[in-house]
Amino acid sequence: MARTSILLVEDDDSLRFTQQMYLQRQGFEVTAVPSGTEAMHLVRTRNYQVVVTDLRLGKVDGLQILRSVKKRTPETEVILITGFGSVDTAVQAMKVGAYDYLTKPVDPEDLVLTLKKALERRRLRRQVAVLQREVLREAGLSHIVAESEEMRRVMTSSRRVAGNDATVLLEGESGTGKELIAKYIHHNSGRASGPFIAVNCGALTENLLESELFGHVKGSFTGAVADKKGLFQAADGGTLFLDEIGETSPTFQVKLLRVLQDSCVRPVGGTTEYRVDVRIIAASNKDLEKLVEQGRFRQDLYYRLKVVPIYLPPLRHRPVDIRPLAEHFISRYADRMGRNRPHLSRQALGKMQAYSWPGNVRELENTIERTLIFLQDREIRADDLPLDTAHSTTPAPGEEERGADLTLKDVEKRHIKRVLELCEWNQRQAARTLGIGYNTLWRKMKRYRIARPQSAGGRQ
């Protein structure tokens, strides 16, 4: 078998020597020490795959070693050796994180068998961790940018709600990443091993949407040549993401409300109901509350969906996220294209931060991909970015006060004011975006007499 690093802690010299020699003959790489103090020093400076330690060691006992190992390297397995009278303590240690315990006198073959089982569990845990990272990467969840205060609040809410089955309503403009957050909630929930199924309600007609979600029986309508299970049944044990829920008809909303209330679905044309265990995450790029006021969305369904509302802010309201998002997409698409990652110039970043991004993060991603397709150099300049100046928050040169001679102070004043407006007058966020300290921004605002309008929100 492959060499495996084992730390053996035993204060009985004869027993320590015997166990070390036996384990080494079995192919293990064994470091043996007589005291807990020496063991504590070693586990702080070196990683072991398994630690085998006597429970009673004197000044520093096996429980202290266990806690230290689990705090520093949680993946390391710990096996305790204990006398008969300390079994209760050993069981308590397993609750802290020990893999197993063996009572004295220890049969060498039992020790080797327990070691092999501990190593197998360690291998499986590492494999699961790798697979989980791969799942998150494939789902696009390995890099969610949340540097702005707004997105940090979104992620905090998402983490908290992931731990239960509450229905979530994600609201925000198109392209803000609602499906990405829905996947994040699913993959961090107890349903992560179940299916995640997304449905764009706005892309299907009412009849087709009913058939897709609830299923249908053979002969229920023209083209129904066989029974078909709906997506509610397909998502059983998992999560169903209903995107653009505001586009659905009042008739469909009634049927959806009934499913949410009863946790049962009846296929189109059928008489039998099927119980389903599905978590619902809904999303809309429209203001559902306004649709309720206009009579276009059922109020009872709205409150049924809005158990936990999460609002995703548009990209123009969180300019601090533009740079890390751009660099993430540059890295992703450069790797896909098999080319070196180009540098983002200061002028290009300024152009992106002065752009309103009507298509939000999705538009930013598409812009970076198109830029890299045609880019010949190793630096992205402002002119390389295919952005429509009509959506720029900074007027083109000469557009304002055409013919006027602007001083450097005038230009700086205008730029500071525009960044403050982009950040909704959040001065700390604006200072980070400008790359200056908060006090420096405050002094410049005072010098240029830049004051926040009474109607503007934001925080200092």
Image: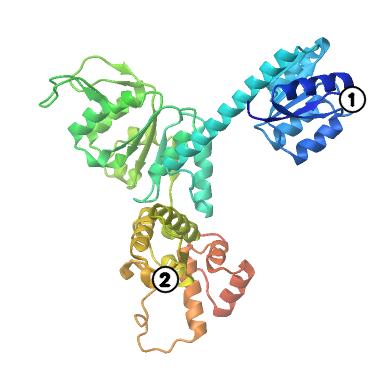
Residue 454, percent from left and from top: 49, 66
| Residue under pointer 2 | 381
Question: Residue 78: in sight, yes or no?
Answer: yes
Q: Nearer the viewer, residue 59 or 395?
A: 59
Which quadrant of the structure image shows residue 282? top left
Q: Is residue 244 left or right of residue 30?
A: left
**Image: 144 above or below 210:** below
Residue 412, percent from left and from top: 51, 78
Element type at mark 1: loop
Residue 317, percent from left and from top: 45, 58
Among all residues in the image, which is located at the extreme front?
Answer: 25
Residue 237, percent from left and from top: 41, 24
Q: What sort of colour scheme is used for the picture?
A: rainbow
Q: Disc 2 residue type?
A: Arg
Q: Is residue 285 left or right of residue 60?
A: left
Disc 2 and disc 1: Cα gap in Å?
A: 67 Å
Quarter of the image where the N terminus is located: top right
As drawn, the label of residue 58 is: 1
Residue at left offset 47%, top offset 55%: 328
Element type at mark 2: loop
